[in-house]
Image: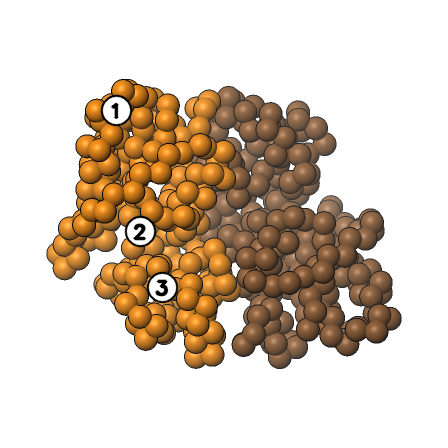
Chain colours: A brown, B orange
Amino acid sequence: MKLILASKSPRRREILGMLGLHIEILTLDTAEEGDREHCTPDALVRSLAAQKVKAAWENVKDRPDAEDLVVLSADTIVYHNGRVLEKPKDHEDARNMLHALSGDQHQVYTGYAVVYRGKTADGFSRTDVQFRELSDAEIDAYVATGDPMDKAGAYAAQGRASLFVEKIEGDYFNVVGLPASDINVTMKKTFGFGLTEPD
Amino acid sequence: MKLILASKSPRRREILGMLGLHIEILTLDTAEEGDREHCTPDALVRSLAAQKVKAAWENVKDRPDAEDLVVLSADTIVYHNGRVLEKPKDHEDARNMLHALSGDQHQVYTGYAVVYRGKTADGFSRTDVQFRELSDAEIDAYVATGDPMDKAGAYAAQGRASLFVEKIEGDYFNVVGLPASDINVTMKKTFGFGLTEPD
């Protein structure tokens, strides 16, 4: 098996690397369509991940090694009080998001989809995240690092903002961007093998 | 302020590095005494961390820069069904621990202690960890990597064994070995400053 990660996220690469997996990266500039107004968060992330993996599979399915390929994609959103938080537009937007999350609980949803020989295994994972009360100075200092700008919800749980997190309930790696433990189980059920051997 | 980590654990160093902190490492070969029979898990880890930090403070308190030093130590245990799981003695012991944790919930406790100008800030953090059902093949393959041998409870949450974890409740970094978010809050309360600036 040869694992292809259809994602630009360096965090997802790191999680797979931590598992000792050698991966090929495939990045396509596709614009996924998601109905943020009328979808539940889990339906939204599953749909976005499915669109990404479909585009990636179309791109590789005629390769001579297509029979060995496992193509994985994922999409992560932050959900707070009924609102989907995407990547912030600018520093002002990032500050507003962090003020909204301060002292409150939010949810992180990651949808994933895996294709092997044309068959798809998919699912999602949800983690509840409780933030501490943040001071203006803390938020300003964090935004000034630039770290929030390419992150849904304007923070990365694995960096300086780990100090903002009081507790989580669910899978930590889902918050980082890839619920590998859940993906592993779903792959085993659907394909008979998981991310690592032996199963 | 100059942070000294009195711990041999590379995981603790990595957590502080992730926060952008420059640290000095001080490793002393002290044998901490813990009453595993008659202490609650939180009392045990607090006591072990306090002993470590006391020895470290004694070692540095006469340095010319002693006024600027913040000395931090921590101790982590895995607690399952009323039993403290330490580092496994051998592969057999590691396999037995992982079989015991399989499909069940356990607790990870980290006690910490910080000394600044002779004053101590201390506390502990507890995280509940739910393991999936593990197959013999999974356990054998993981033990064969050697990864369990220097870890309390015979696993590291940030490596291949992340696939064993179904969910956690609490602080993820506490499971890795250092509840930096909680330490930061406790330091602010006691010393008026935390691990990072600004507070």
Query: Dot 1 lies on which element?
Result: loop
Camera-side mark, 1 or 2: 1
Viewer-closest of B173 and A98: B173
Where residue B195 sits in the image (x, y, percent)? 40, 30
Q: Earlier in the sequence, mark 2 or mark 3?
A: 2
Q: CA distance from mark 2 to mark 3?
A: 15 Å
Please tell me which residue is depicted at 46% across the width and 52% down the height of the picture. A169
Residue under numbered circle 3: B149
Q: Is residue B42 left or right of residue A78?
A: left
Q: Is there any visible trace of residue A49 in the rendered image?
A: no
Query: Dot 2 lies on which element?
Result: strand
Instruction: Please tell me whether residue A133 is drawn above or below residue B124 in the rendered image.
Output: above
Q: Are marks 2 and 3 on the same chain?
A: yes
Please tell me which residue is depicted at 60% across the width and 68% down the height of the picture. A195
Pointer 2: residues within 10 angstroms few (<14), some, or many (20+)? many
Q: Quadrant of residue B74?
A: top left
Residue under numbered circle 1: B63
Please tell me which residue is depicted at 86% across the width and 71% down the height of the picture. A62
What chain does mark 1 sit on? B
Viewer-closest of A59 and B125: A59
What chain does mark 3 sit on? B
Where residue A194 sits in the image (x, y, percent)? 60, 72
Please tell me which residue is depicted at 42% across the width and 48% down the height of the picture. B11
Camera-side mark, 2 or 3: 3
Residue under numbered circle 2: B76
Query: Dot 3 lies on which element?
Result: helix
Q: CA distance from mark 1 to mark 3?
A: 36 Å
Q: Is there any visible trace of residue A111 in the rendered image?
A: yes
Q: CA distance from mark 1 to mark 2?
A: 29 Å
